[in-house]
Image (cartoon, rainbow, N blue to C red):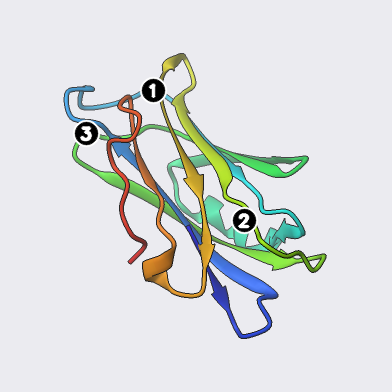
Amino acid sequence: GCVFEGADRSRARCRFCTSLAPGQGSLTGQVMMELGLFTGYAFDTASISSLLANTRLKRIDQDQGKTQVYVDYLKGGEELCIVYDIIQQLVTQNLQPVPHLVYEYYSPDRKGAAMGHVADTYEGAGLAKALGEPGAHVGPVG
């Protein structure tokens, strides 16, 4: 989920987490994380680029309102979170949730999905999803 930074709502800090659902094994192959984008906002390219400091993140592609993050692997019992910023480009009202998707690249049937929200507080925005068990791991941003 995303949390606004400042009263003018021109920036937000976002966090996307994923993990393997129980019973899905101890290790995956390459995983894709697709991050949706709220209407009127753009990804902060500096914060997206800085994600590559995580050695498990191999590549990042941006295209028409979403960002695809290529993750080398996920381990069972471990949560992988990425944090990035978005910047307002156009003033919009009533922001709607955006879809986020995570799936194993070579086994796309192993997937999870969630809707990302933006809020004024961490308690109001939450997103985490377990790969392989839709709806399994949803919790607050902390």
Horizontal and vertical percent for residue 39?
A: 73, 54
Mark 3 highlights which residue?
A: 76
Callout 2 amino acid: Ile
Horizontal and vertical percent for residue 2?
A: 52, 62
SS class, disc 3: loop
Callout 1 amino acid: Gly
Q: CA distance from mark 1 to mark 2?
A: 22 Å
> Outermost residue toward the right?
90
67 or 4: nearer the viewer: 4
Q: Quadrant of the C terminus?
A: bottom left
- Up the image or down, 101 lies above or below 117; here it is above
**Between tags 3 and 1, which lies in front?**
3
Horizontal and vertical percent for residue 132?
A: 32, 24
Instruction: Please give the label number shown on residue 106.
Output: none
Question: Which residue occupies 41% across, 51% down?
Answer: 127
Mark 1 highlights which residue?
A: 29
Q: Left or right: where does residue 129 sit relative to residue 7?
A: left
Q: Residues within 10 Å of mark 2 (few under 14, many from 20)?
A: some
Instruction: Please give the label number shown on residue 48.
Output: 2
First in residue order: circle 1 vs circle 2: 1
Q: CA distance from mark 3 to mark 2?
A: 25 Å
Q: CA distance from mark 3 to mark 1?
A: 12 Å
Question: Which residue occupies 61% across, 62% down?
Answer: 47
Callout 3 amino acid: Gly
- Up the image or down, 61 lies above or below 85; here it is above
Question: Which residue occupies 23% across, 22% down?
Answer: 24
